[in-house]
Amino acid sequence: MKKSLLLITLLLGTTVSFASGNENESFQHMSANIGLGSTGITLDIGTMAHPLVGLRLGLDYMPNITMKKFDLTVSDGTGHAKEVYETLQPNGLNKPGNVLVGAAPGWFTGHLLADFYLHRDKGFHFTAGLYFIGSDHFMTMKNKEKGWFNDIYDFNNSIGAYTTVDHSNVGYIGITLKDGTILGPDKKGDMYGKFQVWKVRPYIGVGYGRTVSEKKIDWSVDAGMQIWGTPKAYIKDCKQGGALYHEVHPSDLSDQKAHDAVKRAKTLLKVYPCVTFRLNCRLF
């Protein structure tokens, strides 16, 4: 990541030096742009720092849309909790067992991008910059049925008063990993997880279209990639009133779909492909 940030910093520094040598042509015009693509909905403003260098500053919003569903194991790790739970909750929904979880991409970030043109009157350009602030995750995980863990949360708060028929202690119920770790739901009866990446993500790419067009309304397109690093998966553990994130590896998950989803994300999404179509409006 340090090498990528150094390269982007040098490129942005070049922009500043270009601008200082062309004060009469720098920052004289501005555009407002709206875009749609793999980074979500994009809003930014653009200006020319030099006849061959444009700057864009803006925001990107990707709404949460469930793309993947899989099951996570729910138990107490001892095999006794289900017996006692069903005795106390005769109208329960056959819990513990498995809970259906939805994984949804979504984020809110800012960006600073520099467009480098080969000719003053041509649209082709190279782009370098940074995506930053806002979300440090690109995907969240949550139980599909809101409040699915409500009864379990109440049960967990009273398990100290119960034992099984053979007087074995009943364990805490929650998301159960292969190593026996139990991750508890929150007081709203939900579990929450996320896939996390770098907070500052370098971008490189190419595109066609002017940062500030000579026309009042124009279009442009960009294609490139954000460098994310290796994604990490976390599930929030709310046992005993806490709220700590526990890192989860593919080998921790019993469900094959969950295992494959986490493994695929960690392997394939070290870089993120970006394609954005923009409508540009020249302000002045």
Image (cartoon, helix red, strand yellow):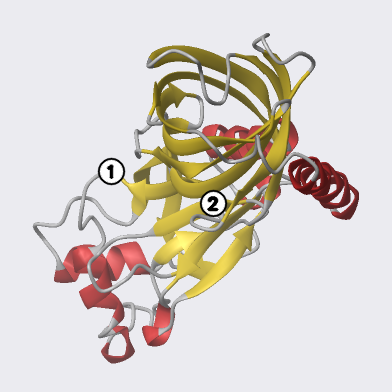
Whole-percent x and y of residue 10?
Answer: 86, 47
Q: How far apart are marks 2 and 1 (CA)?
A: 19 Å
Image position of 57 with respect to 128: above or below: below
80 or 199, which lies in front?
Answer: 199
Q: Which residue lies furthest to the bottom in this view?
A: 161
227 lies above or below 133: above
Q: Which of marks 2 and 1 is nearer the N terminus?
A: 2
Q: Residue at x 32, y 90 (%)?
A: 160
Q: Which of 47 and 37 is in front in this view?
A: 47
Name the residue nearer the viewer: 231 or 17.
17
How many C-alpha atoms fall within 10 Å of the one at disc 1: few (<14), some, or many (≥20)?
some
Secondary structure at badge 2 equals: strand
User: Which quadrant would the C terminus be assigned to in this image?
Assistant: top left
User: How far from the left and from the top, in percent, is residue 157?
Assistant: 27, 84
- Residue at 70% over, 27% down: 51
Residue 88: x and y in percent read: 16, 71
Q: Examine the image and state in which quarter residue 218 appears.
A: top left
Q: Which residue, as the protein is rendered here, is positioned at the far right?
A: 3
Q: What element carries label 1?
A: loop
Question: What kind of residue is marked 1?
Answer: Lys
- Quarter of the image where one finds residue 150: bottom left
Identity, as a three-letter code, of the amino acid under mark 2 = His
Residue 102 position within the rendered picture, expressed as x and y whole percent measured from the top left: 38, 39
Residue 48 visible: yes
* Residue situated furthest top in the rendering: 122
Say whether residue 77 is visible: no
**Mark 1 sits on what residue?**
144
Label 2 or label 1, whichever lies nearer to me, is 2
The residue depicted at 84 percent of the width and 45 percent of the height is 4
Specify the farthest residue to the front: 24
For this rendering, which residue is in front, 139 or 177? Answer: 139
Q: Residue 137 carries which label?
A: 2
